[in-house]
Image (cartoon, grey):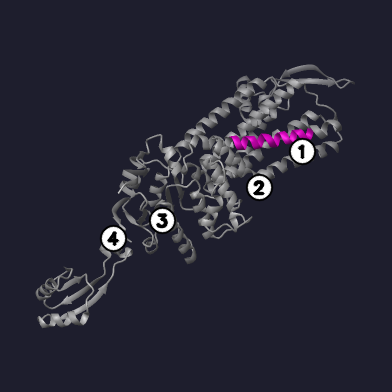
Amino acid sequence: MESILETNQLEKKYGRFQAIHDLTMHIPKGAIYGLIGKNGAGKTTLIRILCGLQKPTAGTYQIYGISNQNPKMIEVRKRIGAIIESPSLCLDMTAEDNLKEQYKIIGLPNYEHLDEILKLVRLEDTGKKTAKHFSFGMKQRLGLAIALVGTPDILILDEPINGLDPEGIIEMRELILKLNQEKGITFLISSHYLDELSKVATCYGFMNQHRIVKEITKEELEQDFRKRTEIEVSNLKECVKYLEEMHFSYKVISDEKVDLYEEVNVSDLVLALSKRNCKVNHFQEKGESLENYYLNLMGGADNE
Amino acid sequence: MNKLLKAGFFRLRKDIIFWLFLFLSVGMAGFTLFRASTSSTEVVLDNLVKEYITYIGLFIAIFVSIFVGKEYSEGIVRNKVVVGHRRIFIYLANLVITSTVSVLCVFLYMAIILAIGIPLFGPMQMTMGQFLIGIGNMLLIIIAFCSIDHWITMLCSEITVSTTICTLLFIAMFIAAGALGVTANSSPYVHHTYIDENGNRHIISQEPSPNYPGDQVVKTARIVYLFLPQGQAQELWDNDSEYMNQMFLYSFVLIAVVNLSGIYFFSKKELK
């Protein structure tokens, strides 16, 4: 799939501290790319570099095939919107004035689509209320609205749901999905809320030790997430023979355990194995989550 | 740059600190006129016109550090970089906006003083040439003040820190300019004088001053004094100052050095 944003062996050092090391990532066009990593992994540093706020110590990145060392990158940046840590908004101005200022910053000739953007983020009725009187969720939505001015192709959101209440989280999720599906905007979202991220992301980049350790699509991840049943048996040989005969998908875990990737009737299975002199000692249904996947990838709880 | 100026002036109209600065300038003009009209001594309109420039540096320090500092704290500087504006233009646009506002406030003050002061106290004593040179110098002093405060704020990025530094710097400059002015204008001799019945001063005799710091010290103090915007503001009180051209030059140098270094450092700055 065509990559809209790529990094190649990106490095960032602050004095002796290595914030990013040998970081390579690919964000496909139209994707919602979930950037996952623990605190201090380098997510925000990466986002700051991609947004042009900081320069990499080494390595390069390309957006739409234009390298960061190319002077044309300034033009490419006009196709990017971002919320980094906190939304960029003037607290003494209304939602409408904040958007108007952004129209002027971008250099748009008129305020076309302004009402539409306000409606999209559900801030059309805020009237003369200034942003400093907005709730945190409203500020986040206004920040997103500002980032949407000039119809960007890429939106970079750093922890967009941090501090939002459940309703705000749902609103943000729906907004992201709507913008991605209806307007084809590519998203790069960093978040600690793995469960929430798994509801929107179409691909993931896992960061550890200041670099991307794994990139995976939603489909690939779902494949890994398949529901499985762990069976502990007294006679593994007979059990495997039976599973082969039934053409079941399985994986031998140990001398006594098998993971079965099929929906089976428990009674039938136990009965069938029992006829083969194989006793089922333990039977447990298991399901993976993004959280488990992340923990396994990072080396388990030791890394937390 | 044009886009940034439009956006900046748009924000300015909604910014309370801008309106405070403007109303304060009007208030200072009113207060100056009131104080002069109730004064028992003879009022020279020239001094009233130039009075504001001697403390405008304080208001500029507060205005620039808050207006520009807010851009940082609210993420607007970051936003401008993200959407593809060059840092040099971000820097210059804010400088143009803050300088324009500061000049506007001083001119507003002067317009009020002249409009009400001339009917009350008569015309100014300085010639049109002196007035225009004074105006030119004032412009450069204001831009120099703005440049210094803007430099600090753009490189500091913490609104409270930059406001504190800018304010303290003005106070330091105010004290330094006062001390340097005394040294720069010290005379190598002590004059014994008398004043005749017409009020004219006559020198009877002179002797070397024991407190004179020496020619080199006086020369150095004068250069530093005239280099400081606050020193220049004080020197402007003298309509016949022989250092007007020197002050133009020093202001140009100061503005150029401060802004070129500011643009350089801001371009290298790691933004958050």
Q: Identify the subunit bearing mark 3.
A: A
Residue drawn 83% across the image and 30% down it: B118
Amino acid carrying label 1: it is: Ala
Q: Which mark is residue B29?
A: 1
Tag 3, which secondary structure?
helix
The mark that comes first in sequence, 3 or 4, is 3
Q: Residue at x 63, y 42 (%)?
A: B63
Does residue A245 appear left or right of residue B82 in this picture? Answer: left
How far, Cα to Cα, is label 2 from label 1? 20 Å
Q: CA distance from mark 2 to mark 3?
A: 41 Å
Estimate the spatial distance between the alpha carbons at disc 1 and disc 3, rounded to whole Å. 60 Å
Q: Earlier in the sequence, mark 2 or mark 1?
A: 2
- Which residue in the structure is indicated by mark 2? B16
State the residue position of label 3. Answer: A181
Quarter of the picture containing the N terminus of chain B is top right
User: Are callouts 4 and 2 both on one chain?
Assistant: no
Which-is-in-front pick, marks 2 and 1? 2
What numbered label is drawn on residue A221? 4
Image location of residue B128, percent across then percent down: 76, 22
Point out the frontmost of discs 1 and 3. Answer: 3
The answer to whether marks 4 and 2 mark residues whose Cβ atoms lie closer than 8 Å is: no
Q: CA distance from mark 3 to mark 4?
A: 21 Å
In the rendered view, does B48 fall on the left or right side of B197? left
User: Do discs 3 and 4 belong to a common subunit?
Assistant: yes
**Residue at x-position 40% and y-position 48%:** A47
Query: Can you tell which of label 2 and label 3 is closer to the viewer?
Result: 3
In the rendered structure, which amino acid carries the disc numbered 4? Leu
- Badge 4 density bin: few <14, some 14–19, many ≥20, Cα 10 Å: some
Nearer to us in this view, B143 or A117: A117
